[in-house]
């Protein structure tokens, strides 16, 4: 009896000692399918690293951005791992807010990361400041049956001229079918992500080499004119309040002939559980106008380590696990290949099982590879970013311009007025920021 | 004839009152209805008849530990309310029964702090919390919510206390009651409806406070407001899940309000008619 008690006590002591030594990582993240899935699979990580416990803070994208910015700028040290976008990484790395990821492990295979995604996460010093969890570009998703009914064939690489023609032909107001669904909700990451990327195909740019705003140039007028006219003729009602989720719902219900948006949507629209048109969807590259640039963006949600953390080594272990090839295999094993986070590793796209499970894989890869954040438009630009401008002022300015363009779409102002006001707002902001001397 | 007119008037005002009440309650009702829809149904447009699925509740429960957030909400809202009452009862007594020339100015100044946008002081408050080790701490948040709601609590109690005749307190004093006894055994029992309604209102305000509770917490002290915020998604449908999370978050306070409505109304209308 005494021996039993002694053994039990010894075991308890060992367990408690282990718990006492365990380090808890606080991870700030957004609520999307891939992130939620990762939270459910962390046992694999904690089993291999019993001395590390994980706590999650899930917030809405903009709240997370604001919350993390406050914490990181004040060195609050509340988070050990951050989920941040491609927009933040170069800015925060430059400010010294992020730790470089130097010890991701021997088997991490950093060269397997897709070059376009990796370049956006690499600082001027050549070091990686964030590891991609999932990446995306944009592409055309379309209804094959409606396209056929309209007597047209979607090319792999369509032009805006073709998209305009197809959208108008596919529109059937009597049956509540809109030829095209595009983002209209105001916001730098909403309508401006789409419109900035599209404007690249029209040869427009936010700023010239001297940071002078370019909304007074004909390229922007062509972009916005085409967008507003197309949406009026073939878009859904109330399009100025539609973002990703609203258009996703419309497409899944069979109310859109085409939808140009994030490649990550492909898995949603082809999922028969949620989509009524799952077996009728085709994919094509984002359209161009023959000027040499396509309107496809580049985005990734990444894991980074803030400079204020006291648990950098454990945090890097976690980042390495969550963005590794092993993690992709783990998701495939537990949830199937179709649910593997896309857009980060070349090896995933070479995997025949993934290609079989994800018919959109090739188009996603081609779209990501076609994006060039350092030369996004036809003319040279002083900034990095395809659907954003990687400067701190862009969040505010992008949303202001987004509101003006959304108002133009809603018919509350003319395209010319929206562009003139955008030019004034951008000039004021860039002068205030010291970009224009 | 006069009776018929009076009856018609009563019916008319009852209908108006019901319409106004339904209008005010409608956002909450629609949130509850949406929580029983599938995600596709939820985003399809206005529809008052849900399919009755509880998949969103199951998803919310699977994704988060509701009771941890609930417990934090209870501790923070009740704690801050009690702390606010301890501070504000003597403050309101002093202003109601021993006013000075500056009492009105002090009251106005206290109220004016509510006019300041919270975001203006986010960084200084965050730095203070960081330096005192109060980030993601229930005590820190309790103090913060006490400070935020103190002006309203003092104002409400001041208004109730002023309705109590000063002569009663004078009589107690003449009978030899100390200041402590005067406040605890004479004033407080007489102001119970007012104190109760202030307490309930303050709990509701603290329960629903979202700006500071989301920004000053991460995991340990996060209340139900943070729980709701975690269900908003940038990519993927989330309205039904968000509605289910909101329903779970407001249910306790709604039930509390329902059971205490008599007390709440009595306190809020205290002294309204002389």
Image (cartoon, rainbow, N blue to C red):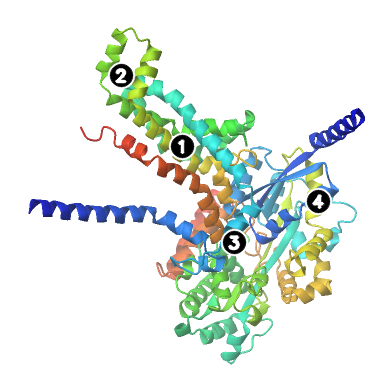
Can you give x and y, in whole percent of width and height, for residue B114 in the image?
A: 41, 36
Dot 3: chain letter: B
Can you give x and y, in whole percent of width and height, for residue A223 in the image?
A: 54, 73
Q: Is residue A216 visible?
A: no
Residue located beneath label 1 in the image: B203
**Foreground residue among A108 and B258:** B258
CA gap, disc 4 and disc 1: 41 Å
Left/right placement of residue A294 relative to residue B228 reads right
Residue A7 found in image quarter: top right
| Circles 4, 1 touching at the beta carbon (< 8 Å) | no
Dot 2: chain letter: B
Residue located beneath label 4 in the image: A45
Residue located beneath label 3 in the image: B55
Can you give x and y, in whole percent of width and height, for residue A369 in the image?
A: 74, 70
- The correct choice, above or below, for A107 with respect to A275 in the image is above
- Which label was assigned to residue B97? 2
Q: In front: mark 4 or mark 1?
A: 1
**Foreground residue among A366 and A414:** A366
User: Farthest residue toward the front?
Assistant: A1
User: Farthest residue toward the bottom?
Assistant: A151
- The correct choice, above or below, for B49 with respect to B84 in the image is below
Q: In front: mark 4 or mark 3?
A: 3
Element type at mark 3: helix
CA gap, disc 4 and disc 2: 64 Å
């Amino acid at each position: 009896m005494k021996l039993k008690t002694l053994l039990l006590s010894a075991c308890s002591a060992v367990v408690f000692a282990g718990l006492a030594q365990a380090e808890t990582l606080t991870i700030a993240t957004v609520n999307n399918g891939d992130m939620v899935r990762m939270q459910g699979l962390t046992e694999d990580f904690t089993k291999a690293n019993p001395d590390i416990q994980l706590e999650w803070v899930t917030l809405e994208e903009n709240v997370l951005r604001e919350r993390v910015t406050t914490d990181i700028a004040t060195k609050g040290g509340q988070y050990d791992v951050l989920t941040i976008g491609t927009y933040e990484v170069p800015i925060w790395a430059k400010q010294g807010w992020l730790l470089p990821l130097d010890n991701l492990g021997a088997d991490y295979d950093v060269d397997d990361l897709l070059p376009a995604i990796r370049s956006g996460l690499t600082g001027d010093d050549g070091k990686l400041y964030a590891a991609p969890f999932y990446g995306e570009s944009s592409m055309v998703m379309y209804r094959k049956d409606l396209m056929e009914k309209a007597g047209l064939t979607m090319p792999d690489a369509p032009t805006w001229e073709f998209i305009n023609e197809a959208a108008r032909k596919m529109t059937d107001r009597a049956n509540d079918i809109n030829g095209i669904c595009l983002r209209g909700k105001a916001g730098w990451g909403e309508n401006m992500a789409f419109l900035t990327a599209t404007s690249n195909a029209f040869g427009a740019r936010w700023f010239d080499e001297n940071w002078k705003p370019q909304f007074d140039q004909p390229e922007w007028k062509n972009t916005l004119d085409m967008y507003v006219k197309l949406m009026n003729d073939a878009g859904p009602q109330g399009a100025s309040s539609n973002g990703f989720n609203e258009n996703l719902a419309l497409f899944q219900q069979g109310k859109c002939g085409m939808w140009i948006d994030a490649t990550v949507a492909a898995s949603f629209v082809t999922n028969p559980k949620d989509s009524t048109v799952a077996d009728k969807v085709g994919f094509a590259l984002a359209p161009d106008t023959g000027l040499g640039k396509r309107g496809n963006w580049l985005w990734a949600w990444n894991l980074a380590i803030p400079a204020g953390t006291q648990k950098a080594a454990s945090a890097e272990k976690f980042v390495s696990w969550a963005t590794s090839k092993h993690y992709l295999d783990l998701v495939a094993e537990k949830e199937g290949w179709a649910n593997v986070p896309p857009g980060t590793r070349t090896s995933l796209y070479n995997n025949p099982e993934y290609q079989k499970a994800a018919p959109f894989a090739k188009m996603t890869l081609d779209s990501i590879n076609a994006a060039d954040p350092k030369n996004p438009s036809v003319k040279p630009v002083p900034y990095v970013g395809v659907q954003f401008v990687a400067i701190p002022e862009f969040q505010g300015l992008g949303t202001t311009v987004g509101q003006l363009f959304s108002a133009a779409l809603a018919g509350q102002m003319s395209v010319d007025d929206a562009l003139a006001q955008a030019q004034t707002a951008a000039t004021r902001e860039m002068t205030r920021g010291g970009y224009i001397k | 004839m006069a009776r018929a007119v009076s009856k018609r008037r009563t019916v008319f005002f009852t209908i108006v009152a019901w319409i106004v009440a339904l209008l005010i309650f409608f956002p909450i009702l629609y949130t509850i209805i949406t929580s029983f829809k599938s995600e596709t149904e939820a985003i399809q447009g206005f529809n008052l008849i849900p399919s009755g699925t509880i998949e969103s509740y199951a998803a919310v429960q699977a994704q988060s530990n509701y009771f941890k957030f609930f417990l934090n909400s209870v501790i923070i809202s009740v704690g801050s309310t009690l702390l606010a009452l301890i501070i504000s009862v003597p403050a309101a007594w002093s202003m109601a029964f021993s006013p000075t020339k500056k009492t009105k100015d002090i009251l106005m100044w206290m109220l004016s702090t509510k006019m300041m946008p919270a975001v203006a002081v986010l960084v200084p408050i965050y730095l203070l919390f960081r330096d005192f080790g109060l980030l993601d701490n229930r005590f820190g948040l309790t103090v913060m919510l006490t400070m935020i709601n103190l002006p309203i609590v003092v104002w409400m109690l001041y208004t109730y206390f002023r309705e109590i005749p000063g002569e009663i307190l004078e009589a107690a004093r003449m009978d030899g009651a100390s200041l402590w006894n005067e406040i605890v055994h004479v004033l407080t029992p007489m102001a119970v409806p007012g104190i109760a309604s202030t307490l309930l209102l303050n709990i509701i305000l603290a329960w629903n406070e979202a700006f500071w509770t989301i920004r000053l917490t991460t995991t340990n002290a996060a209340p139900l407001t943070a729980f709701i915020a975690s269900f908003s998604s940038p990519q993927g449908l989330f309205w039904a899940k968000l509605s289910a999370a909101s329903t779970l978050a407001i249910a306790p306070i709604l039930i509390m309000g329902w059971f205490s409505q008599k007390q709440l109304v009595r306190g809020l209308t205290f002294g309204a008619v002389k």
